[in-house]
Amino acid sequence: MPTSTYTIAIVGASGKLGRLITEHLITQHPEIQIHAIARSKDKYSPVVQTAPQVKLFQASSSDKVALRTALSGTDICVCTYFGTPDLMLHGQKLLIDICIEESIPRFMGSEFTFNYLAMRPGQHPAEDWILEYSSYLAMREEGSGGKLRSVRVLNGAFMEAVFAPFMQWVDPDLNTFKHYGSGEEVIEMTAIADVGAFAAEVAADEHAVGCFNVLGDRKTIPDIARIWGDVFGVETKVECRGSLGGLDAQMWAAYHREPNNPEAWTGLFYNHAMADGAIYLGGLDNGRIPNVKAVDLREFLQQGMPAQLW
Ligand SMILES: NC(=O)c1ccc[n+]([C@@H]2O[C@H](COP(=O)([O-])OP(=O)(O)OC[C@H]3O[C@@H](n4cnc5c(N)ncnc54)[C@H](OP(=O)(O)O)[C@@H]3O)[C@@H](O)[C@H]2O)c1
């Protein structure tokens, strides 16, 4: 049980996941102190702005002095940045360096996704940063002689992202579901609220280190169509968009056409990476965080139409 001086820093607390983690800690662990850090104080939610145990900080991702002040005296730095590869790599490297300088014992990086460490370099241009980031973290962790320990939370896709237009899996107006490959490819997914709760609980446990694989459900596109049809009482249609080989050619052509416009190709790369079993999570750690019960896909859809978050 953390003491009343136990303090969690959340960098990116103005974002969707950062807010969920912060608000979970505020309601479920009122004894924990929180340093909420974002580039603009105006974007904090009202709950975060008014909670007595939260101190609000403003710091850009490259302002070492401001970040150092905000992180000083905390017991874990939780990063929830989401942005360019430059932010994800250099912004997080700076946070890792500050953790070591300020003797902050744990760092939870902004991953909250598939096991992208299993990817080959170049397999997904928008996620390549994770390989360099991860090598840097491992090098700094090892060099710190036990002063810094890394913490990772991996959860597959956010359930909300499965229904996002950029993935092109679902047309909710036509109740049509589309896949590449055989249709037997499994998508691992967790609702963003559950990811926030899992991450908050891992951060709140001062002894939690290493990787936590958490998951709400594993479903194929035809499974998703069937559950959607059951929950919303509609006829659904499943279509095949082509082979995985065809997808491979299509995504690289889209990338080479517009390398600086990830919106044009990133969904295709996610589709491909997900069909590649290498990035599946493997053994799950949900049981190590028993006070969070993740919803499965049916329960998630029973809460209503998925919110369009991205
Ligand atoms: N598994 C999945 O399907 C999935 C899907 C989406 C995201 N994710 C992961 O979830 C995590 C958070 O995503 P999210 O959806 O919560 O993102 P988000 O709502 O966009 O929030 C991102 C945070 O990063 C901050 N930020 C962005 N650019 C910045 C910059 N240049 N300098 C400083 N701060 C900056 C934002 O600040 P402002 O509020 O000022 O903009 C915000 O606090 C990331 O690790 C991401 O990889 C996973």
Image (cartoon, grey):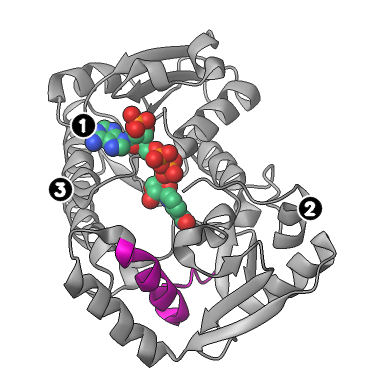
Local crowd size for mark 3, using a 10 Å CA cut-off: few (<14), some (14–19), many (≥20)? few
Where in the figure is residue 63, as x and y percent of width and height?
A: 15, 24
Which residue was labeled with disc 3?
143
**Ligand 1 lies under 8 Å from the Cβ of mark 2:** no
Q: Provide the residue span drawn in magenta.
A: 264-283
Which amino acid, by three-letter code, is at mark 1?
Ser
Local crowd size for mark 1, using a 10 Å CA cut-off: few (<14), some (14–19), many (≥20)? many
Which residue was labeled with disc 1?
61
Which residue was labeled with disc 2?
302
Name the secondary structure under disc 3: helix
Name the secondary structure under disc 2: helix
Which amino acid, by three-letter code, is at mark 3?
Gly
At 17% across and 53% down in the image, what residue appears?
136
User: Is residue 134 or residue 240 the one in the foreground?
Assistant: 240
Q: Could you tell me if residue 29 is visible in this image?
A: yes
The answer to whether residue 248 is left or right of residue 279 is left
Q: Is residue 69 above or below residue 123?
A: above
